[in-house]
Image (cartoon, helix red, strand yellow):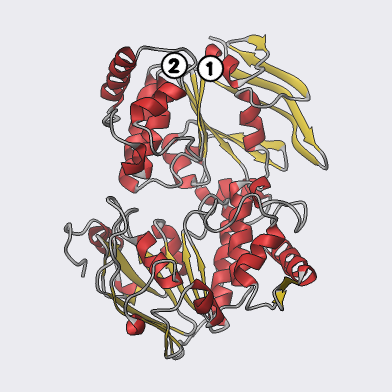
């Protein structure tokens, strides 16, 4: 039986960048094939050529043993290639049915399309009401729309780009069940992810890229997560170095009875949240997505207007009624979960994005005028220190890959040396090498005396970083305790705590 997809010597060059350098590999029918590599290794460029979004400069794409040209995504879909992108392209004001209809190549009567959608959902256990408005759906439910839209075309190859980066563990398990069922029916899966433990659990084969070149094809089940990560980065993976005998100083951040109002039909506010973070301490907050993490970060950063002055204090100064700018002046920096449009403005340069958050702390604005020299110098340091792949401070945030944008955002806040740093999902979408570098930078910042709050769905990340840990469930926070006092089982029980009751 011929290979479902085969690439032979695929090369693609952009000004100053050789994105793919004579890449060759094959995907068999019914195979779940991982495509691995650091940010900028060439993965996205490669799958965009397979899907017809761009064309190779040289090389050949073969489909079921025959050479083919894929001039555009519509042609790819006609061949039987479907793709689910990392960032969903959905209209929030429209229903599930309307969004799927907009993505179909052929016009299908609404009643017939709904019947087909329900059939696909029933077959693969993707439960969703076609008449629900997208704005009312969780991230996992939104991903189901993209998957259903792809499955309606009966794909022979399904490309998944970072499909679990914003899913809960339960949603990941459901996705894997769907993908394994598809593979058993003969559909090939090309799977891009930075989560190497998922690759080991799901994939039959892994192709590893580094610097645009193919460096290895291996059986992920015969590898360790560490060995695959080291192949991706081309060197040994560094462990987090924490100074021995670390001692914590005086309380830096004190939160006392913090409560937020419900701002929408589907958000989860926080209720009576209290904790203290000392100088040099990293507090990890675990929880399944959608349990009030966004409300907590917004309340701490000042994006959600506070109602109690004493609810939040930094160095003994009550800041509960201050706005985001005032809180930054008093030493609080924050990184929200959503990097596109929230943590950074895509159409702005990296230098301008630095001005947005560092202007007061680093003197980038004088007498109402932007000091572009200071902004460019600082942004250049962020790019260098955090190995951000960008064409300098003038590059727009939107021109960066997701992982490189995350490195820039984290670096922009860490290098301000804040008194308190609150971050949500600090390594979302970054590769193992970059994640290790970000983790070490956070530890170094804490060692220098900052107090840090890390909100994350990644338990491995929290266990590697945290000194103390708390768990958020339905907007309530458990008491924080030293990390060593928790077992993994206890953390899991607290994460899935009784609905509406304090997980304590």
Outermost residue to the right: 16
- Spatial distance from mark 1 to mark 2, Cα to Cα? 7 Å
Labels 1 and 2: the sequence-earlier one: 1
| Disc number placed over residue 419 in the picture, else none | none
Is residue 106 in view from this perspective? yes
426, 399: nearer the viewer: 399
Instruction: Please report contact status of discs 1 and 2: CB closer than 8 Å, yes or no.
Output: yes
Residue that badge 2 annotates: 153
Q: Which corner quadrant of the image does residue 414 belong to?
A: bottom right
- Compared with 147, 324 (above or below) is below
Q: Secondary structure at mark 2?
A: loop
Q: Residue at x 66, y 34 (%)?
A: 45
Q: Residue at x 35, y 71 (%)?
A: 469
- Compared with 357, 61 (above or below) is above
Q: Residue at x 62, y 36 (%)?
A: 44
Q: Secondary structure at mark 1?
A: helix
Q: Position of residue 319 (x, y in %)?
A: 42, 82
482, 286: nearer the viewer: 286
């Amino acid at each position: 039986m011929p290979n479902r997809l085969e690439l032979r010597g695929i090369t693609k060059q952009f000004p100053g960048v050789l994105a793919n350098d004579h890449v060759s590999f094959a995907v068999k029918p019914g195979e779940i094939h991982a495509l691995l590599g650091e940010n900028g290794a060439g993965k996205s460029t490669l799958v965009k050529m397979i899907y017809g979004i761009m064309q190779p400069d040289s090389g050949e794409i073969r489909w079921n043993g025959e050479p083919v040209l894929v001039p555009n995504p519509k042609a790819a879909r006609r061949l039987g290639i479907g793709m689910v992108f990392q960032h969903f392209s959905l209209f929030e004001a429209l229903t599930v049915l309307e969004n799927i209809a907009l993505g179909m190549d052929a016009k299908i009567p609404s009643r017939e399309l709904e019947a087909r959608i329900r059939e696909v959902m029933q077959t693969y256990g993707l439960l969703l009401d076609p008449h629900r408005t997208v704005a009312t759906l969780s991230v996992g439910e939104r991903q189901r729309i993209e998957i259903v839209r792809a499955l309606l075309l009966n794909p022979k190859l399904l490309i998944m780009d970072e499909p679990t980066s914003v899913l809960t563990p339960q949603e990941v398990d459901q996705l894997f069940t769907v993908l394994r069922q598809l593979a058993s029916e003969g559909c090939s899966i090309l799977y891009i992810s930075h989560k190497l433990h998922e690759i080991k659990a799901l994939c039959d084969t892994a192709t590893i890229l580094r610097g645009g070149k193919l460096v290895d094809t291996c059986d992920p089940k015969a590898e360790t997560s560490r060995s695959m990560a080291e192949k991706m980065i081309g060197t040994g993976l560094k462990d987090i170095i924490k100074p021995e005998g670390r001692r914590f100083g005086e309380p830096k951040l004190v939160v006392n009875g913090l409560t937020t109002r419900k701002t929408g039909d589907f958000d989860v506010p926080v209720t009576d949240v209290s904790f203290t973070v000392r100088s040099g301490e990293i507090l990890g907050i675990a929880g399944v997505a959608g349990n009030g993490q966004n409300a907590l970060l917004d309340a701490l950063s000042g994006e959600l207007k506070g109602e109690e002055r004493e609810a939040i204090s930094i160095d003994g100064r009550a800041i509960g009624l201050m706005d985001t700018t005032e809180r930054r002046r008093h030493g609080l920096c924050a990184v929200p979960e959503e990097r596109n449009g929230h943590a950074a403005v895509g159409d702005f340069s990296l230098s301008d994005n630095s001005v947005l958050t560092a202007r007061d702390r680093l003197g980038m604005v004088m007498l109402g005028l932007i000091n572009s020299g200071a902004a460019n110098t600082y942004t250049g340091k962020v790019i260098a220190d955090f190995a951000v792949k960008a064409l300098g401070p003038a590059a727009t945030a939107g021109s960066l890959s997701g992982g490189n944008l995350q490195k820039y955002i984290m670096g922009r806040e860490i290098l301000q040396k804040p008194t308190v740093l609150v971050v949500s999902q600090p390594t979302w979408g970054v590769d193992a090498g970059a994640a290790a570098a970000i983790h070490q930078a956070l530890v170094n910042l804490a060692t220098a005396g900052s107090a840090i709050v890390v909100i994350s769905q990644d338990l491995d990340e929290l266990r590697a970083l945290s000194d103390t840990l708390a768990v958020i469930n339905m907007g309530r926070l458990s008491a924080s305790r030293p990390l060593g006092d928790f077992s993994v089982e206890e953390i899991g029980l607290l994460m899935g705590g009784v609905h509406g009751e304090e997980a304590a």
